[in-house]
Image (cartoon, rainbow, N blue to C red):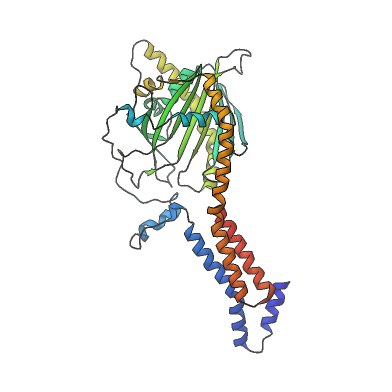
């Protein structure tokens, strides 16, 4: 009603000129808010919207929707790095801090948000549950628990590590190559290229990975790591933020009560694929079960493959490396959990001290600018309310970015 009254007041001016002038003055705060929004939106735009120069604008503009259409580039080049290098070069790719983090995730002591149930499905030889959570920063995170019947932890460990065999059951993996490995710790650095839907370019991953063993439980860490031996190309697009780690251990069979003939896999996964996160979440939700169902037939084929090798054959290099594990005792793992409680609290306090300054600066700037504009234009409470309302929206937008 206040807006209608203000418009009626303007329309009652004696001349057209006065009406036009009043309408322009009335709309000025809105245009100021729009201008501020453009500036703020550009300053905090996602990385994939940035273009470097005016001459490249034609080529770079599609990157604003780079998950739909992406520019072409030179084809993938094979790295020249030797498959086996000195231990001091690659053993630090994945270290005890990563084991610590994975252990906290498994024990649900990492201090992160609560997990939201997504799925609970059962097939002939497996059961599957999945959860999701949305941290304050970073892409959505996923947790799953899968129980495979009639499978040992060692077989499942080798199955997930064997890139040579993975290409036979994982139709998204189109290239896998070992860049570095350490025969002492079992640490590996591998290059993957995964096929994405037709509206996206393929994605490249440089992954560091390592396995720790505690009894019959295996803590398998894989994450994105930097590697200078493979120059980054525009296509396939490099995924830098990648984390996919799991805990593998014996489990009671769902078919035969009391028998520990099954294997439990607890997986934690997140990555920034360069796709808007809300769209990525929708895609994961729709395609999750279809992708998971393909793993069990692949595992059964791998069991037959290993049986055939027992008659005389050679393990792949990746499967051999999967058997080189760093041993850790239960007491050491429990000490990590006890130590973590104080560290997580300190980390949360430190993050709490850091985040407000970075996030509130744009909010303060926007609200402060709104105050200046509102005080400089005397159009009564309505105009000031419009300015502050838009400023609050923009401040909230900047915070979410």
The one of 198 and 231 positioned closer to us in this rendering: 231
* Name of the residue lying farthest toward the top: 311
Q: Left of 305 or right of it: where is 371?
A: right
The one of 267 and 283 positioned closer to us in this rendering: 267
Q: Left of 65 or right of it: where is 177?
A: left
Give residue 13's quadrant in the image: bottom right
Q: Is residue 398 above or below residue 379?
A: above
Q: Is residue 194 above or below residue 383?
A: above
Residue 214: x percent and y percent? 50, 19
Q: Locate the N terminus and report the quarter of the image it occupies.
A: bottom right
Q: Is residue 137 above or below residue 18?
A: above
Residue 169: x percent and y percent? 43, 28
The one of 11 and 255 positioned closer to us in this rendering: 11
Give residue 368's quadrant in the image: bottom right
Residue 322: x percent and y percent? 41, 22
- Marks counted in the figure total 0
Residue 377: x percent and y percent? 61, 77
* Name of the residue lying farthest toward the bottom: 14
Q: Residue at x 41, y 39 (%)?
A: 195
Confirm whether residue 134 shows in the render: no
Q: Is residue 18 above or below residue 356?
A: below
Q: Residue at x 53, y 66 (%)?
A: 36
Confirm whether residue 36 shows in the render: yes
Q: Residue at x 54, y 59 (%)?
A: 362
Q: Left of 14 or right of it: where is 312?
A: left
Q: Residue at x 40, y 34 (%)?
A: 207
């Amino acid at each position: 009603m206040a807006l209608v009254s203000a418009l009626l007041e303007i329309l009652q001016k004696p001349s057209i000129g006065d009406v036009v002038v009043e309408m322009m003055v009335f709309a000025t705060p809105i245009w100021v808010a729009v201008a501020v929004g453009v500036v703020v939106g550009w300053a905090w735009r996602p990385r994939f919207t940035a273009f470097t120069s005016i001459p490249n604008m034609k080529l770079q503009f599609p990157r604003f929707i780079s998950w739909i259409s992406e520019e072409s580039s030179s084809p993938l080049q094979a790295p020249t790095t030797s498959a086996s290098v000195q231990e001091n070069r690659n053993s630090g790719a994945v270290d005890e801090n990563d084991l610590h983090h994975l252990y906290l995730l498994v024990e649900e002591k990492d201090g992160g948000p609560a997990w939201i149930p997504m799925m609970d499905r059962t097939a002939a030889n497996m059961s599957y549950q999945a959860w999701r959570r949305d941290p304050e920063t970073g892409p959505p995170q996923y947790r799953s628990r899968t129980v495979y019947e009639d499978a040992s932890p060692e077989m499942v460990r080798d199955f997930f590590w064997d890139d040579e065999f993975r290409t036979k059951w994982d139709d998204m993996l189109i290239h896998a190559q070992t860049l570095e490995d350490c025969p002492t710790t079992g640490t590996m650095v591998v290059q993957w290229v995964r096929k994405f839907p037709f509206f996206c370019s393929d994605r490249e991953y440089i992954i560091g990975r390592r396995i720790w063993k505690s009894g019959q439980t295996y803590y398998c860490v894989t994450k994105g790591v930097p590697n200078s031996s493979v120059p980054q190309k525009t296509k396939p697009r490099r995924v830098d933020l990648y984390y996919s780690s799991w805990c593998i251990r014996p489990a009671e069979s769902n078919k035969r009560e009391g028998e520990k003939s099954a294997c439990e896999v607890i997986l934690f996964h997140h990555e920034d694929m360069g796709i808007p996160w809300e769209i990525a979440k929708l895609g994961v939700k729709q395609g999750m079960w279809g992708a998971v169902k393909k793993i069990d037939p692949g595992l059964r084929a791998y069991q037959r493959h290993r049986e055939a090798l027992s008659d005389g054959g050679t393990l792949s290099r990746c499967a051999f490396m999967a058997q080189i594990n760093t041993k850790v005792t239960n007491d050491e793992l429990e000490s990590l959990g006890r130590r973590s409680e104080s560290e997580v609290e300190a980390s949360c306090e430190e993050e709490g001290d850091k985040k407000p300054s970075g996030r509130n600066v744009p909010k303060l700037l926007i609200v402060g600018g709104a105050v200046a504009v509102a005080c400089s234009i005397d159009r009564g409470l309505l105009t000031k309310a419009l300015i502050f309302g838009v400023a609050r929206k923009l401040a909230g937008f900047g915070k979410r970015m």
